[in-house]
Amino acid sequence: MVPEFGQMALVIALVLSLIQASLPLAGTYKGVAVWIDLARPIARTQTLFMVLAFAALTYSFLVHDFSVRYVASNSNTALPTIYLVSGVWGAHEGSLLLWALTLSIWTTAVTLFSRSVPRETVAQVVAVMGMVSVGFLLFMILTSNPFDRLPNPPLEGRDLNPLLQDPGLAIHPPMLYMGYVGFSVAFAFAIAAMLGGRMDAAWARWSRPWTNIAWVFLTLGIVLGSWWAYYELGWGGWWFWDPVENASFLPWLVGTALIHSLAVTEKRGAFKAWTVLLAIFAFSLSLLGTFLVRSGVLTSVHAFATDPERGIFILIFLCVVIGGSLLLYSWRASQIRSTVTFDLVSRESGLLMNNVVLVVTTASILLGTLYPLILDALGVGKISVGPPYFNAVFVPLTIPLAVMLGVGASLRWKRDDAGRVLSHLKWPLVLSLVGGVLFPLLLLPSFSWGAALGMVLFFWITLTTLLWLKQRGGAQGLRHGLVATGRGGWGMVVGHLGVAVFIVGITLTSIYSTEKDVRLAPGEQYTLGGYDFLFKGVRRFNGPNFTASGGVVEVSFEGKKITTLFPEKRDYRSGMPMTEAGIDAGITRDLFVALGEELDDSGAWSLRLYHKPFIRWIWLGGLMMALGGLLAASDRRYFRFQGGDVGGGG
Amino acid sequence: MKLKYLLPLGIFLLLVLLLGVGLTLDPREVPSPLIGKAAPEFSLPQLHQRDQQLSPKDLLGEVWLLNVWASWCVSCRAEHELVRELAATSTAAIIGLNYKDEVADAQRWLLRYGDPYRLSVSDIKGNTGIDWGVYGVPETFIMDKRGIIRHKQIGPITRESLEEKILPLLAQLEEEQP
Amino acid sequence: MTHRSHYGLALLFSLLLSSFSAVATIEAYHFDDPGQEALYKELIAELRCLVCQNQNLSDSNAELALDLRRQTYEMAKAGKSREEILSYMVQRYGDFVLYRPPLQQSTLLLWSGPFIILVIAITTLVILIRRRKHEPQPLPQEADLKRARQLLQREKR
């Protein structure tokens, strides 16, 4: 019965979201207050039914109701409870349910934290989000119903993809979806602003914290995914430029442009049309990602079971949502006359430059992702576009971005003087050039210009950011700056330092990583990056739903034992083999061992050894960016709703 | 002035068109660069007469097919019925390339499911497979009388591919002068 | 071919061959020349495994990836150059095996695209900012002015 309840809850949620998408909006045109005020309660009720549906599916997993096709395909009785729960979003149907649930949770959040926003605007925002809900619920009910029953339920279910049986991956999709779907709030605010013809500083102020929080989730989701790929896939990589990864990175890049552009629109009333367009882009790219993952037009490691019918549905949905909003944009944006002027040298220009580089990066990655499809569609041939291309494009574009990042914060609004800026920044410039070259020369195993460049950028961002803090303190200097800066300012500082840390991680890992595939018999050792890896042998054991071979590798440095690593090779009951790498994490380096195959009867195995300097800095940088976004979103001025007193720093 | 605001919509519509076309394509099917080129050379032992070799040169002047199969390949069994039907209705020679298989397993497989091939050759290490760009068994190549590869069927032969592509092409190639 | 059989085929393919698996077989190939080893590693990272979803030879466990790794190893060890090995692969499997698409007519737009987009974007930006500066100011609407004043005051506080 429970699955039928879930099914019914979905249908009711669909009906409610149809009302949510229409009545409040109609109310704003006809001036019917009752319809307008319906927005909040109906959105919350819709959420309630989504929660019920989600609970019903979770329950079916927990009680092993294999008469539900989705449960039978993605879980079995041996699966640990945590993966029964995360199994709910482990495949296509359930992850859609999570998507739709997340969307309604965001909608409810908007109804709760928008007391300072005019109720007409709230009604419009809620209605737009309701339209997106309608699309996703229809998609689910018509093509991908998670509650479908099997006529002959099996006694035992299939296994959840063993790759997903990992705590990191259990929370990665919810984070990512919170990010993707969170951009729907910024999107809905932008649409509401266009509908109401009020594309001004106020809408920017309302949507800024929402956008920041969505961006924080997306950042965390991507960081988690990258970290998971690193320790779970067993080949030591952390980013593969797979179409699905790009699908999450593209909205992130545009989202990053958006949070900066919103800042200008809020503070200076500039770039109004541009900011609205970015808000549309950010969410559109989230939807496009959904299409790419689920339609099967691109081959990807992470692709869901694909189905052309689903592809057509999502494509139509994309047309309605994105096409409709761009049409609205082309109509409304031409009516905006910007009243703000600024010089070529000014903070506005700097931020616009940042936006340009971010959007160009986005467009280039999108071009690379879709190019094989373009050639195939034209019948010109099949090619692959992979990491060598994306790195060649991404890295050069990141450099001006990092340089601009240092200059931007020091620029004055409206008009600045290039000479002043240069003399203001001359010390950070000199120090970072010297420091960047000296660092690899003195502290790294060998000098490389790439490493020098990365370190110059690191010092440049760090020093200019500190200089900005000092400037905030005025005559009393850095110390006072630390106190005087509001959360918004701190958000920028931490976020930008995160970029610096991230750059160090990428640069040093890519240049100084070493790896070796070796054949080791028990008692033999191999030296890599100064570390001695001593192979002690392999023992066999059983897990809850797998059998495993566990290697024991003792690592020592200059004769002193540091750690013992336990790389594993698991054979899951589903017949899929998996590697669990043995990793010793450290701030300046990771040691990583993956177990290969037993080579002969002497007990020798093949092993892959990695020494990866500074790899943690990549994720640390990402976490700092997320923390920065969180700080900025929690700035006091967004929470002083009553009385219009919204002062504060930033 | 207004035109510039229509630009995003225009780009988006182009994208939709592209994605729409993309839905009708199969990203996994990679066309062979060997089409229109001479069949790659090999000299492999025959499956049933291990001391006899076969080379594509031996088939010059004939229209022939190279069907890549293996006893471990599940979809080879799915297409096998059609390969037998093809052998019965067409005059073209069908050569089997037994790919990365054990000789005994392969012989047993043919006994069990029928042997439509004029003969099969053994590519135990898969080197000939690499030379022919084989990436998903079963695959079928069609050669004309001059030994040029004219068509490659990737994956199992289906009723449709047999009737719409393979049979008409074979008939056309039989007409051509060597 | 109709869609149906088309996708049936794709499905069959993925059932039989895809085997996206998290285990990369580790061969522990031995090289005497570190240059050859570096070449081998570089190549297996840049060559695509055809039967896999989207993986290079290095990360794949598929039978074909194993064979092609062995082939790459043997060629590298025999002293073949990067170009020789790549053209060997392209002759057999087409440009699809290259994760670094070759620069040719059909990829001209791919490789020049980012640069073109950047130049267009920056030019547009500079022109817009300049033009805006020189244009006579349109009269701001009263409501906008009022709101701007309010905002400015808030900022000062």
Image (tube, rainbow, N blue to C red):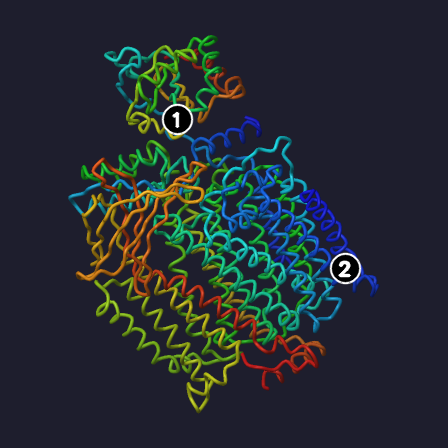
On the rendered structure, is C76 left or right of A2?
A: left
> Is A95 in front, or is A486?
A95
State whether discs 1 and 2 lie on one chain: no
Label 2 resides on the chain identified as A
Label 1 resides on the chain identified as B
Residue B35's tag is: 1
Residue A62's tag is: none
Q: Secondary structure at mark 1?
A: loop
Which picture quadrant has residue C131?
Answer: bottom right
On the rendered structure, is A141 left or right of A166?
A: right
Kindly identify the residue that appears in the image at 45 percent across and 65 percent down: A623
At label 2, counting other C-alpha atoms closer than 10 Å, the crowd grade (few under 14, some 14-19, many 20 or more) is: many
Which picture quadrant has residue A447?
Answer: bottom left
Kindly identify the residue that appears in the image at 46 percent across and 8 percent down: B88
Query: Residue C17: x, y in percent?
Result: 42, 32
Mark 2 residue type: Leu
Which quarter of the image is occupied by the N terminus of chain A? top right
Q: Which residue is mark 2?
A: A25
- Residue A190 appears anywhere in the view: yes
